[in-house]
Amino acid sequence: MAVHQVETNIHQKVKVSIKQKKKKKFNYVPYVFLLPAIVLLLVFEYLPTINAFYYSFTEYHILSPAEWTGLQNYKMMMEDEKFWIALGNSMKYFVITVPMLITLPLFLAILVNRTIKGITLFRVIYYLPVVTAMVAVAIVWKYLYHPTGLINAALHGMGWDHANINWLLNKKTALPAVSMLEAWKAAGFYMLIYLAGLQTVSKELIEAAKIDGASKVRILWHVYLPQLRPVFAVTVVMATLGTVQMFTSIYVMTGGGPLDSTMSLPLYIYQKAFVEFDMGYATAMGMVLWLILMVLTIINYKLSRGGQSIQ
């Protein structure tokens, strides 16, 4: 009987607590503040994404209504030689540019990670290209790469008598030349990320390494770099996403030439959408680009988490 009485009391208390929870008023205040952001996300991100997914299965030329064609755009893509060239070039940009965006900014961050007079000025100078418009930078570099430009003049000055290369009209040099511009412009941004990471490294570890007689190279390799693993992960993810989406510099400097040797996937999507007005096909390629970015992001995320767990 005692046990039965206890069970009855427990059931009654549970029922009372459930009723009290039901009587609690719904707190709508947080959702009121979130509503503008939710509406903006729906209107400018999620709805366009859903529409893009739909239009990728249609033949759509802006002025004419969209006609459902199923997988026809994706079949065309598989047979489109220019699409594969553009995709391959985007991967080349990734292979060339990302290593530069990992090493060059780290070198700059080490240089400016000092407490000497005027170091702030150097940090500002290295960061200036980041805040400069890409169109302006691309135009300047286009003149630098001209056969009579400053780069060839510098090579002449160093004794290279055959330095009359037309960098942007040569199939072998055009793509690396554009990659160099992208790495130079973004280096200051990643330098700040590395600099923030360097300044969080434990000073006790550095002092202990110095007391043990470690050289500067050993301190960099065994103290700084292991502590910068999360920073490396962030840099790789951001550099990968930025590189695969390269557009403005290519559009201004080469327009995808010569002979499509610098054509990137975003530029080819732009040409199909706003030059040929084939929105359905362009949207299908955009969905493929989105999928590639998602896969690369997930891979980088998994690798970065693996590196942190080892640490």
Image (spheres, helix red, strand yellow):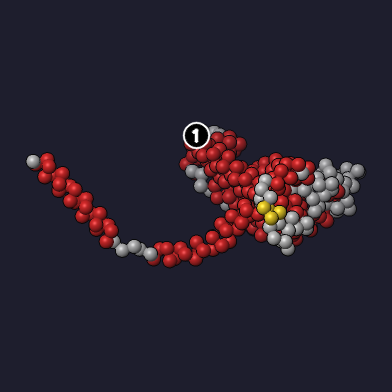
| On-image quarter of the N terminus | top left
Asked whether residue 151 is in view, the answer is no
Residue placed at 84% from the left, 44% from the top? 171
Asked whether residue 36 is in view, the answer is yes
Q: Is residue 224 above or below residue 285?
A: above
Q: In this image, 165 relative to 213: left or right?
A: right
Residue placed at 78% from the left, 42% from the top? 81
Residue placed at 58% from the left, 40% from the top? 299
Q: In this image, 183 relative to 34: left or right?
A: right
Q: Pinpoint residue 240: horizontal percent, then vertical percent.
A: 64, 45
Camera-side residue of 100 and 16: 16
Q: Pinpoint residue 241: horizontal percent, then vertical percent.
A: 63, 48
Q: Pinpoint residue 259: horizontal percent, then vertical percent.
A: 84, 46
- Report the number of discs: 1
Residue placed at 86% from the left, 53% from the top? 146
What's the residue type where badge 1 is placed? Ile
Q: Which residue is mark 1?
A: 310
Q: Quadrant of residue 249?
A: bottom right
Q: Pinpoint residue 283: horizontal percent, then vertical percent.
A: 68, 53
Packing grade of label 1 (10 A; few <14, some 14-19, many >=20) is few
Label 1 element class: helix
Q: Is residue 99 above or below residue 279?
A: above
Camera-side residue of 112 and 167: 167
Camera-side residue of 8 and 69: 69
Residue farthest toward the right in the current orientation of the protein: 161
